[in-house]
Image (cartoon, grey):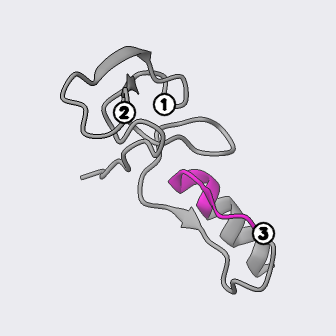
Amino acid sequence: MTRFIPCLECGGTGHTWFFRGGVDPAAHTIGPCEHCHHDGHERCSECQAPLTDAWIEPSNADYGERAYPLCAMHMQLYQEEAAG
């Protein structure tokens, strides 16, 4: 079973939300989330496919390496290239 990661921009709702500030019970959507293409799934940084649980994260906070998500296929390619 594939487990998709919720979009970090919209929290997996697929919508862009508007809040007036504070404790706002009248929060409402103002349109589809452009980051996840309205399906609520985080996207691969290489091919924009819905992301499963494959990630590359910085191994040390002292380095400027950026954490970015990869789909399973691109994670495998990354691991093969790093190994040889």
Kind of residue indicated by mark 2: Gly
Which quadrant would residue 47 be assigned to in this image?
A: top right
| First in residue order: circle 1 vs circle 3 | 1
Query: In terms of depth relative to the viewer, which is nearer, 84 or 45?
Result: 45
Kind of residue indicated by mark 1: Cys
User: Vertically, is 4 above or below 67?
Assistant: above
Kind of residue indicated by mark 3: Glu
Mark 1 falls on what kind of element?
A: loop
- Which residue is tagged 1? 36
Q: Position of residue 19 (x, y in %)?
A: 36, 28
Which quadrant would residue 83 be assigned to in this image?
A: bottom right
C-alpha gap between disc 1 and disc 3: 28 Å
C-alpha gap between disc 2 and disc 1: 6 Å
Q: Position of residue 62 (x, y in %)?
A: 77, 86
User: Vertically, is 52 above or below 9?
Assistant: below
Q: Which residues are magenta?
A: 65-75
- Which residue is tagged 3? 81
| First in residue order: circle 3 vs circle 2 | 2
Mark 2 falls on what kind of element?
A: loop
